[in-house]
Image (cartoon, rainbow, N blue to C red):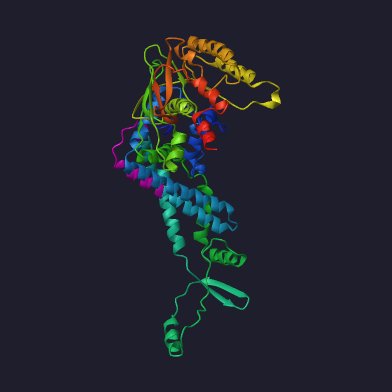
Amino acid sequence: MAFHSILFERTEDSIKAESVEAPLFFLDLNLDQVVDAIVAGKQENNLRPFFYTSLGDIEAIKYRHEIMIDLENEVLFEDIQSFAEKMRAMRSHLTLAGKLYYKYQKERMFLDAVAIYGDAVNCLAHDLSRLVLKSRGFLAFRAYLTNYAESHPFTSLVAETKKLLGDLSSVKYCLLIKGNHVQVRKYEPGIDYSAEVEETFEKFKQGVVEDYKAEFSDGLTMNHVEARVLDFVAQLYPDIFSTLDDYCAKNANYLDETIGVFDREIQFYVAYLEFIAKFKRAGLKFCYPQISKECKEVFDFEGFDLALANKLINANSPVVCNDFYLKDKERIFVVSGPNQGGKTTFARTFGQLHYLAGIGCPVPGKEARLFLFDRIFTHFEKEEKINNLRGKLQDDLLSIYDILNQATPNSIIIMNEILTSTTLKDAVFLGKKIMENIVQLDLLCVFVTFIDELASLSEKTVSLVSTVIPENPALRTYKIVRRPADGLAYALSIAEKYRLTYDYLQERLKS
């Protein structure tokens, strides 16, 4: 198989135009926070477009799964990390060369960058040859890299680089400094009198002696005197420095484009695996989900919200996992229950799981089967916009109307706490109308609501309820379970609105 990309097996799967903008639903699902955490420290690789583009093909997802599984081999992971560090050092040298002013210093920095590149390619080719690889992506890349490392253009570049470095290291010269005059000439060995001078003056030393040795800067910045000295050295060794000029001119495009692309793209996998490692250390599970374009009987066991879990782990707090499944004709989760009980977190989890699966990543949970969507739509409760002269209910209805017009049977809709700005009677009426449209589309949906009647509206709806500790209803378990709606959700929202909840009453009794 000819190697094209470590992210895309087929050229037609590649990103045609990399998006710099996150999908609209990212903010509602807190996927913006997840991606921020994943790419932190890897800004130079510009990985965000890879996380902003979902795949529309199951084989493309399996292609990434295989590579992720290969990278779970610690030896391979370390080999890739070593290669990335060398390529980072190479880019650092090139960047520095671009900032330097003096010609020969720039050329030497370029020469060192090429030397690092040659070492990076040869080391990775050797490392991959020793490993048992199973993924299509790595097998194809190894074949490509081996052929490239053995090709005449590359071996000639490495040999020429090594010889030129050796020639430059052989350059020796003397400086004769007298007043304001500096003379540069080829090195001529002479007698070293330093030992005799030290021995002669040793007898005069009393106590701690001040050190008069000059300190030379180890920085790369050259002043004009040093630059002129280097120009004179080049005149003393014209053949070597002429070769250096020619070398830099003809090898300006030394970097193989495919290897350069691999260096960037492989960081998509590295960044994600590094990110989820912290969750695994905390005992949370990840799996490679089964993906289907036809079957909507989805499930996930021990799943969790990655954005929330990231905050909780950083705060040394426990993470609550939840299960879900849809079977037969079931399509819609209607989630009700007390506020602050984990309903919104569950909705975000459902969306996150499907999106991460859609970009070929392992997902939270010990086992999962998920649906390959065409689009994800979200509608979460937002503050009223005073600048558009519309009420909150009208804004909600216009947004939902737009979503329902664009959605297909292969879409996913996640709605959270809508219709809270109207009366219960109107909310029930509007909620049923919205639900009837969703049922008719036969798409997957999570509908978080205080309207319990929606949970039993159709054979396609499943009632989920956020639970509390029976002995103390004020304490949430953050577990979401399959059971009929208990009729308390709206009552609780009214109680909170008028400060009549258990917590508010306890506060009043204390005062």
Task: Based on the picture, tell me whether residue 130 belongs to the magenta stretch.
Answer: yes
Whole-percent x, y for residue 470 in the image: 39, 27
Give the quadrant of the N terminus.
top left
Please indicate whether residue 461 sits to the left or right of residue 252 in the image.
left
Seen at 60% across and 64% down, the residue is 223
Left or right position of 328 against 30: left
357 falls in the magenta region: no
Residues rendered magenta in the picture:
119-139
Q: Main secondary structure of the magenta part?
A: helix
* Residue beneath the point at 58% across and 63% down: 222
Nearer to the camera, 263 or 497:
497
Picture quarter with the C terminus: top right
**Would residue 379 be visible to someone looking at this image?**
no
| Residue at position x 48%, y 11% in the image | 439
Which of these two is toward me, 473 or 248? Answer: 473
Percent coordinates x, y for residue 304 in the rendering: 41, 31
Left-right relation of 182 to 121: right
Residue 318: percent from left, percent from top: 40, 38
* Residue 418 in view here: yes
Q: Is residue 387 above or below residue 191?
A: above
The residue lying toward the viewer, choosing from 33 and 490, is: 490
Residue 231 occupies quadrant? bottom right
Count the numbered circles shown. Answer: 0
Residue 457 is situated, as x and y percent measured from the top left of the image, at: 47, 10
